Image: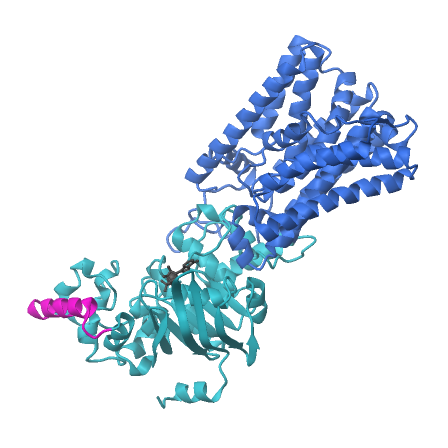
Amino acid sequence: MSTVSAERTETAAPVLSMRGVSKHFGAVAALTDIALDVHAGEVVALVGDNGAGKSTLVKILAGVHPQDAGTVNFDGKDVTIHTPVDSIQLGIATVFQDLALCDNLTVVDNLFLGRELGPWRLNEVEMEVQSWKLLRQLSAKIPSVRIAVASLSGGQRQTVAIARSLLGSPKLIILDEPTAALGVAQTAEVLNLVERLRENGLAVIMISHNMQDVQAVADRVAVLRLGKNNGTFRMKDVSTDDLIAAITGATDNVVTQRAAQSGAAAAASTAGTAGPDGTAGPDGTTRASEGAAEPGAADGPAGPAGMGGPGGGSMPPGQPDGNADQPGSGAVPEEGNVP
Amino acid sequence: MTTNPTTPVVPLATDLQDERLIRTEGFKGAIKVGVNRVRGGDLGVLPIIVGLLVIWTIFQALNPFFLSSANLVNLLLESAAVGVIALGIVCVLLVGEIDLSVGSVSGLSAAIVGVSFIKLGWPIGLAVLTALAAGALIGLVYSLVYTKFGVPSFVITLAGLLGFLGVQLFVLGVEGTINLPFDSFLVWFGQQAFVPAWLSYVLAALGVAGFFLSQLTLSRQRVKNGLSGRPMRLVVIQTVVLAVILFFAVWYLNQTRGVGWMFVFFAALVLVMHYAFTRTQWGRSVYAVGGNREAARRAGISVNRIYVSIFVLCSTFAAIGGMLAAGRLAASAQSSGTGDVNLNAIAAAVIGGTSLFGGRGSAFSALLGILVIQSISSGLTLLNLESSFRYMITGLVLLLAVILDAVSRKSRTSHGRA
Ligand SMILES: Nc1ncnc2c1ncn2[C@@H]1O[C@H](COP(=O)(O)OP(=O)(O)O)[C@@H](O)[C@H]1O
Ligand SMILES: [Mg+2]
């Protein structure tokens, strides 16, 4: 708890501080008594199983639906976020899980929606130029910005949604499963981007099911379980085991059992065969058995190494099994050169 | 650069650099883009132009007076009133809503003008303003009911259809019909006001020059900023085609009475709305709300304000249309705005290519659509066919237009242009 970054985050006041936030939909208590702090220059990963309430938390911050109880403090002031406009004006930019793009409008139109240049005489040229600049920064593979968003692939739409959030100058960026639909290179670009945002002193909340992504960029991990806080961990101090236990609510569960199985399988044959059994499922879960041995250590180099390359660079961690569901690119690390 | 040494080193425009982009530079490229677009279900104004030509050919074959200058002058004048109402319908359709009460609102507006101008002796300007205000107020009420209670617009406006027909009858009182004097502004505007020949040519020239210059400056600005410009040849050809059509039309109409001011007024409203829809933040928001309301809301657009502005605009256009119709008829009658006014206005917007599904369409669809409907109406009148045929044929054309809308929507989805 007393690392350098810990000192920084503990001295400065958090950009966002939520206390006692609750939200229910009819009889379903989606969120109960949630507390969450995010500091400037900090990436907080928000993890939890499906239905844990992550997206609901995001939507409260984005003004999509206001909370039933609790306080939100932003930039030192208690705020009430009733509408998306409130959220945007505070400096919160959100990339929604369901993206929220207008299919009938072009890429440029979507990027600048709600903040068009020249309200009475749209400056289409300037908007298009800025769009290209922004999309190039994200290494977006979008053939034309003058085509309707409907004709883009899932990953391209995701990139447009992320690019959207960067326009304007937000203080807090919320990414709800930003890499879920992305390819290898694009995932790396998004993780790169998240690191750049942190370097620029922005606060970032990133939701992800991918433990590799989380470990690659997060400073802290906040776990939600069944709509309640289930621990906040400093990335450096926590093992994937502990995280998964916090997410699933038990140390003995399907994930660890499965990890134990594949761990045994890996031990039985050469380590290399554990990867090819492809379906091995939840990323980073198999690593739970082995990764525990060298928790934080692998992360250090993983970030830069994984980010650096132009394409196929999204295999951050050094663990062998982590590659189980990654396509191609044969990044079988240590064991790879044994046979 | 690395693989192919023959690649020219001329820097490619920023928007043409993706290697998957099928080269569409220059004139031929532009043609190809157009063809692909139509194939992909983005039909634009093509079906309606074709439809209009077919209708004109048939009626001209049946009655040679149809395409005469005198008849076309009349046809344009007849188009203006319902055309303005259709412009309002385009507004509501763009946000994916509907207004079924435009006929009643136009009738009420005619009644208000008639009563306040003739019976109460108000100055015509005040009478017109009152009718406009009534239209705007009705739209405001609709939008408030819609945004506060979430009642579907077709139900609210169905109630309005009945309710405001009642108000219209009430305002007109026992006599039922109020004749407007022929020397009043409204009647003059609807029947006698024609653009002087020289001025009509000047207006046409301004239109052509405006089109050419806006295309040219846009293209220049794009090239200056490293984007691809529009091919010069294409711009020139488009300008020439536009010039030929406009000047020929003006010349032909000037063979008899010329271009009516009322039609010019309608065309001007269409141009203003076209600008508002395509070149302002408000217009962009309108399309966004029609395409994905929740996405628009999350982008920070005040969706309710858009609905308010749209419903107010629609009812106000209906009020304007009602006054134009009263001027044309030289009377405010109990029958003003009843009958097929409502359906013709809605049909015109849809036939003109504005989608019933929201988020797709243009101000020009009001103009093109009403031309189709008035052509059918005028042609059948010339053939001495009763209104029964007019209803049947207009109904058929509307059905065709809606089918085209639905089919091209499907096609767009499969071609990734939804
Ligand atoms: N708009 C809504 N209406 C009703 N229930 C909802 C709504 N949004 C979310 N929920 C419920 O709230 C819970 C949390 O959902 P969500 O925040 O989407 O989970 P997560 O994003 O963590 O997978 C779920 O039980 C879900 O069914
Ligand atoms: Mg979610």
Question: What secondary structure predominates along the stretch shown in magenta?
Answer: helix
Q: Position of residue A88 (x, y in %)?
A: 56, 66
How is this picture coloured? by chain
Q: Nearer the viewer, residue B369 or B82?
A: B82
Q: Position of residue A266 (x, y in %)?
A: 11, 68
Q: Quadrant of ligand 1?
A: bottom left
Q: Is residue B176 left or right of residue A198?
A: right
- Residue A258, picture quadrant: bottom left
Residue A151, can we see it? yes
Q: Is residue A117 magenta?
A: no
Q: Which chain comes out cyan in the rendered image?
A: A
Q: Position of residue A38 (x, y in %)?
A: 45, 78
Q: Nearer the viewer, residue B166 or A329?
A: B166
Q: Is residue B164 left or right of residue A197?
A: right
Q: Position of residue B227 (x, y in %)?
A: 57, 52
User: Against B28, is A107 above or below?
Assistant: below
Q: How many numbered marks does the figure carry?
A: 0
Q: What is the quadrant of the N terminus of chain B in the image? A: bottom left
- Residue B369, picture quadrant: top right
Q: Nearer the viewer, residue A311 or B231?
A: A311
- Residue A98, picture quadrant: bottom left
Q: Is residue A263 magenta?
A: yes
Q: Colour of chain B?
A: blue
**What's the residue at 69%, 48% (across, down)?**
B140
Q: Is residue A322 left or right of residue B23?
A: left
User: Against B95, is A50 above or below?
Assistant: below
Q: Which residues are magenta?
A: A250-270
Residue B264, can we see it? no
| Residue at the extreme front of the image, as rendered | B174
User: Against B407, is A321 above or below?
Assistant: below
Q: Is residue B343 left or right of residue A59?
A: right
**What's the residue at 44%, 39% (across, down)?**
B413
